[in-house]
Image: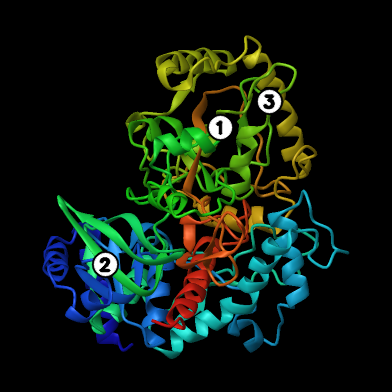
Amino acid sequence: MNGKEEKELGKLLARRKVLLGAGAAAGAAAVAAMPATAAARSRDERKWDMETDVICVGSGAAACSAAVTAVASGAKVIVVEKLPMAGGTTGKSGGVTWIPNNRFIAAKNMQDNRADCLRYMARYSHPESYDAASPTLGLAPESFRLLEAFYDNGSKMVEWMEEIGATKFREFKVWDVNIFPPDYGDHLPENKANNVRALEPAVGAGSTTGGNSLAYQLEQWLTKRNVPFLLEHRAVGLIKDGERVVGMEVRNNDKLLRIRARKGVIFGTGGYSHNLELVRLHQPGLYGACAAVGSTGDFISIAQQAGAKMGSLGTAWRTPVILEDALNNRAIGHGVFFAPGDSMIHVNKYGKRVVNEKRNYNDRTRAHFAFDPVNAEYPNQFMFMVFDDRTLNRYAGALPLPLDKRESKWLIEGRDSRELADNIRKRLASLSAAVGNYRIVDSFAENLDATIERFNRFAEAGRDEDFDRGLHEYDRQWQKVFSPVSKKSTYPDNDKPNGTMYPIDRKGPLYAVILAPGALDTNGGPAINENGQVLAADGKPIPGLYGAGNCIASPSGPAYLGAGGTIGLAMTFGYLAGRHAAAQKA
């Protein structure tokens, strides 16, 4: 792509941010009016409004990777998207793509050994069953095959996308600090190739534009090949001929269309973060999500009606969220991906630290779900990010820290720990309809004082004896990214041995923000095999039905393997599904 083309792409990406694609939606309505061919009707008693080889449902990384692969393999494709604009949750992301054994690793005379990488993924994804001596590393054979498929085909997917001109990748260096990012399990002994698996779009990359660029490039590749995008068309059901899926029904306003799929239907419709019924049934806590508003789990009920076997439904790509921000609107813009600051801790209802505040957002959020069997409660259901003036001033503007505390709706302040505790109680009482009986204990202020005193000793010594904060590379490197120093800061640099910790000023004032468990999106749903085929209750593939991305049970389970772990899996299994579907006989 030359300079002129890059400039034009930038203009188009900016426009996509502010438009909902009214013109594209009108175009979709025109496409939807296309009649089915006479040949289709003569071969089937059903009346088809349209027909194609492959239907791809959704328009993010998973569905569009499947569509691109199927088209490049010679199949005809129709893309169905229920929102007014293509891109899905991918369009809101950074576009980073985690790919094992990618071509850039070999170019640096390094290697990402297959056995080593599989051990890392298996250990992180399923620590409860991991066994290094087992042929399947302790995993169920079907789970192990998914990880094998990811390792074996992720790099092939990248090279395929580049070869056909759909998109091009480069190594991901973290934006302003120019570092290769550590994996989220960077310190696990099984991880032998840290810092080398994260890629990003070679054009249009950036913390807020990379996913938009990736989604747009895939969409444009398809559009140039006259692939119809049926925007504002919602999938409502599958059509089967015996056991085989042969088409689907979609609804556009009051109009129901029946689309024939000669080779297969591939779902890449996202998770169910914005379906409150499913969230209440399957999530231990999910107060808000970054996912596109269309992430309502449509595929779960559709697949169930087709006889699909469900994989895990309780997993998600998790992130802490600001409770009051999420209560205002579940579709949040950003989570608290990395807690900024050095003179800062997270405490539970007892005023005690329970987690390394600098670990990755997915794993850090899981600390909210610890159950106390004696008191029969979740003491960490909500956490309180507590900090002093140094963190508020020095790192102002790094979420959830406000640029100006007078403008923050969720900041809680107190002259000391006792007043802070009183004001937290008042805030929780005002939110009682949402937080239920969750209250801080009477000894919260006393415990918080002791917690801060203990933390301050660790900060002076440079070693967190409780949670190893700052011990591992992830903590230190991502601190540089998500704790940028404000240009208006009046506080000096951190001169302590551990740059992620600095003593909290107990003289006050002290501040707190209430954090709740949230998500980028859920990642549970129907089970698939290594070809992206959705499995029936008996474990056999349902002919003609595929899934990839957040709408299916994640091949990595609850583990977020590294930056771009969501999109890497989505694109790889979209590629596998598209390739397999395109190879079927019509």
Residue 412 screen position, x and y as percent: 45, 24
Q: Nearer the viewer, residue 237 or 232?
A: 237
Q: Nearer the viewer, mark 1 or mark 2?
A: 2
Mark 3 residue crowding within 10 angstroms, few (<14) / some (14–19) / many (20+): many
Q: Is residue 208 left or right of residue 549?
A: left
Residue at the disc numbered 1: 387
Q: Disc 2 marks which residue?
A: 259
**Type of amino acid under label 2:** Ile
Q: Which mark sits nearer the N-terminus, 1 or 2?
A: 2
- Colouring convention used in this rendered image of the protein: rainbow
| Mark toward the start of the polypeptide (3 vs 1) | 3
* Nearer to us in this view, 223 or 312: 312
Residue 473 falls in image quadrant = bottom right
Rendered view: 184 above or below 162: above
Q: Earlier in the sequence, mark 3 or mark 2?
A: 2
Q: Position of residue 549 (x, y in %)?
A: 48, 61
The type of residue carrying mark 3 is Lys
**Residue in the picture at 29% in, 64% down:** 80
Q: Is residue 42 above or below residue 15?
A: below
Residue holding disc 3: 352
